[in-house]
Amino acid sequence: MSGISLAGVTKRYPGGVLAVKGVDIDIESGEFVTLVGPSGCGKTTTLRTIAGFETPTDGNIRIDDENVTDAPPYERDTGMVFQDFALFPHMTIHENIAYGMEAAGEYTDEEIDARVEEMLELVELPGVGDRTPDQLSGGQQQRIALARALAPRPKALLLDEPLASLDKQLREQMQVELRRIQQEIGITTVFVTHNQEEALTMSDRLAVMNDGKFEQVGPPEDVYNDPDSRFVADFLGTANIFDGSVTAIEDGYATVECADVTVQATAQNGISTGDDVSVIVRPERIRFAAASESDADADATANATANASASSSTNPSADGGTQPAPETVFKGEITFKRHLGSSVEFRVETDAGRELVVVRRSGLDERGPGDRVTVSIGAADCRLVEE
Amino acid sequence: MTNRTDTSSETGTGTGAATTADAATTASDTEASTAEPSSSDESGRAGLKSRAKWYVLSYPLFWLVAVFFVPLCMLVVFSFWENIPGGQYQIGFTLENYARFLDIGFTSTWPFIEPGLYLGQLWLTVELALVTAGLSLLLGYPMAYYLARMNRPWLRSVLLITIISSLWVTYVIRAYAWQVILASGGILSSVGTALGFLAEPQSFYPGYWGLVVGMVYVFLPFMILTLYSSLRNLDGELLEASKNLGAGPAKTFRRVTLPLSKNGVMSGTALVFILALGSYVLPRLLGSPGQRTLPVLIEQQIMSESNYPFGAAMSIGLIVVVLVFLWVLIRVTNVTTASLGGTEEIATDGGSQPARSSAPGPLTRFRSGLGTAAATVGLTAAGNRLGSALDSLVTRIDANTRESIIWVAFRTYVAAVMVYIALPLAIIIAVSFTPEEFLTFPPGGFSLQWYAEFFGTEAWRTALLNSLTIAGAAALLSTTIGGGLAFALDRFDYRWGTIYGTLGVLPILLPPVIIGVAFLVFFLELEIGGFALAGSRLGIIIAHGIFYAPFPFILISQGLDEIDRTYEEAAMNLGASSLRTIRTITYPLIRANVVSGALFAFILSLNEYIISWLLSLFLVQTIPIQIFNQLRYSYPPTIAAASVVFIFLTVVVMTAIDRLSGGIWE
């Protein structure tokens, strides 16, 4: 097993469209890396340059420390699972799985048969070898496509949105299955998806792509909690975003003036007074103040904005940290509520007219649409990024 | 991946570039990798790729340009050369040939001009084609409607197979069948006298109406199949909606069915018109000397008078008529070249669906144009009144009775048309078993002696062997030309891709007699250089190979178009080289298309008469030529036996095609 490295990989199409704009990544041996991004971001093109279906206009690709930039697909030793599986319709399952080994020409018939059986065991579909692809369900075809890709013992596994055509329940089941098999074999894997949830749940590392470039590369928790850009925050999960400019930085906290509100956020390296920034707050980091307290506050002040800095000193952090962190407090009304199973999502319209998304654990709140609430955001729960 | 929507698929428009947006992206993205040999050097790979692209194209292009287009151009050149009586000609420049062709006489009475012999015959040719197309439409529309609407699949298959089978049997045999029916002492005359309609035996051929009956018989299947697929696409719910909104059957037909099948009507009529225009065998065998159409005159100039320059000039005249017609058709209906290619989809489902690709807009314009014209003469008003009268009449009868009356009338009609289509060949089959010396019907007993005669005669055996050899070799040639072109246009982008694609379907649009003359002229010139192709089987093979290349071309293009490119990518990802991918993935996936393309070419070549005849120079006998020659002298029942053997071969091959493609006719 071995790694893949991309250095300055660029792909320009004959029409002049720049699909990939110089991406760099070193994928370690056995690592599961996901390329995630919206349609047209270049993630599939990147994967196809690794597979050899596209030749990069610039840059180079190494698999197992061998420069394969210009090698044809059949000399690269990658195993790919296609979005619609591409199981050969005129062959049996057995013939499909054996195809790669036959093409390699290095295996005896006995070895091939044994390997096919082994692969069918691995994907938990023993005994389907004599069937044809159209006799299998979508999920089964998916497993066979995986078995076929892995059978010739490739150096890397490439997955091009393989779960996109499955229904939700099957997709979740296959996410787990795919990861199990990948870890069992320990194969270097590049996974392409536009589904942010898949990217977050399956990967060792993920690379968020936008407009042909990597916006951010890192482990899922890091990318989710500390997005490097407004795009990443917006694309992965839900984010409340406050655009404004930094008016002051004091005691490690930055004050950000937005059109409707002033937000206190933990300062970050590289951000200084006068910068235009976005403040990013994940919905589950926003807290509701206790009902009685919120009523009192509602009486005291009509305008959340005016109250923001004042309340930061009066309300100590609920975390009970050693140092009271500043908070930003809003008053508003719940406009919408929906249950997500283990959690509940609220939409709160602040009195200044901004909509906030708040996610709370299920069963904590009886409040619903029409109720007035006070919400607070701790400075430590805010992530500042340059606009 | 919207930003990857490429430029390349535009270049290959209409020639088989991938269709759906998604497929287009993947397809053209992979083009680079599908057909190129391996090399680690980047510029080397690019070079190889661009060279491979020309290597692949050079083969079909050699045939279509050097061996097809050049002869056509030579035909133009030839038409200006001078004829020396006695079968010689010399290089020169004279307009004499055209002057003779376009000769107009002047008279002292109105309209003061009188077309010369050739212009008169040209008009007759066009008129016959128009009459044939018109009658085919009238007869074919209700038939096609019935086929499309009936709900007994097995019966539909039986009817369709009957129609399609007769379609491919050589014109020579089918004209012969009508001779048997129409001749003095033939079936019609015998039945007529027996029933007392005729006072004495009478011959209905040669003559104008005998010829028309034969022409309609031959071309009606093309019309039915074209209309059938057009009507079949018509959503049944639309008709129900119309009825639900209160329109009676007549109104529903006039306002919904007819307008929606206009495309089919247009293309069916155009197809039959073009085919009838180029028809040689029927006017020659069923027409009187006065009904010599242009193809017949051309053949006479070539084979009897050996006046090649004049024959060439008349061929150009016929091409001009075809081109003018196509031009008008395109102007009026805005049928594009792509859909003209669609006209050739006879191959895919028996003469059907050329209309699908033509734009409805201009057709609507055409229709409303027609509507205006009709309104001015009060036709629409009359039609409406007639329609509502009919509607109120039928509505008064209770629905069930009405339905059954309509269906009984319909079935009777359909049965009559089916008899018209099937009977002639049935008669030939019956006659072939006669124990008597002459053709009689009904046969006076049962005997296989004429089959024994057929297989026992050297000349027939040679002809059969020649037919099979030529058809087999021509099918292979067609398939390599058509397949090569389809593959090249599908895999690579060429600047003139559309033109190459048009070249791929062009041969079949031209009247075969012209193809024959062009090749003959070309081969005779080659002979000076030492290649004796005229009068040899090889010459006929080459001509047939090119003439029928459009069938494999269209079928294989379709196959390649429908292949999901990811199968090929998957194969290469699994380590299969380009060649291995083509062998193990691409070819198996389009095998049905390749084989049916080859079989179509085979069956068409097997049944072809006029090209073979022109190129045979009396030296090569095929079954159609042999039958035709025998028809000139007498009617030995051997002809019937030969025909039956041939019909049998044809039906076997058609069934094979049908099996292969899993019910291609549906």
Image (tube, coloured by chain):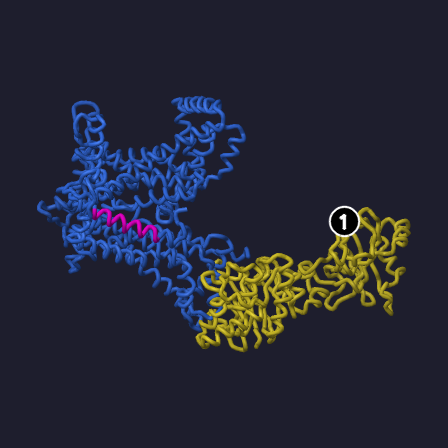
For label 1, the crowd category at 10 Å Cα-Cα, with few meaning under 14, some 14 to 19 and many 20 or more, is some
Say which chain is blue.
B
Q: Is B203 drawn above or below residue A329 in the view shown?
A: above
* Image spot of residue B175 (x, y percent): 23, 40
Q: Name the residue under label 1.
A: A336
Q: Residue furthest left?
A: B86
Chain of residue at mark 1: A
Residue B581 placement, left or right of A269 = left
Q: Is A271 drawn above or below residue B369 in the view shown?
A: below
Displayed quadrant of residue B51: bottom left
| Residue appearing at x 42%, y 24% in the figure | B383
Displayed quadrant of residue B581: bottom left
The one nearer the camera, B199 or A208, is B199
* Image spot of residue B355 (x, y percent): 40, 42
Say which chain is yellow.
A
The one nearer the camera, B286 or B22, is B286
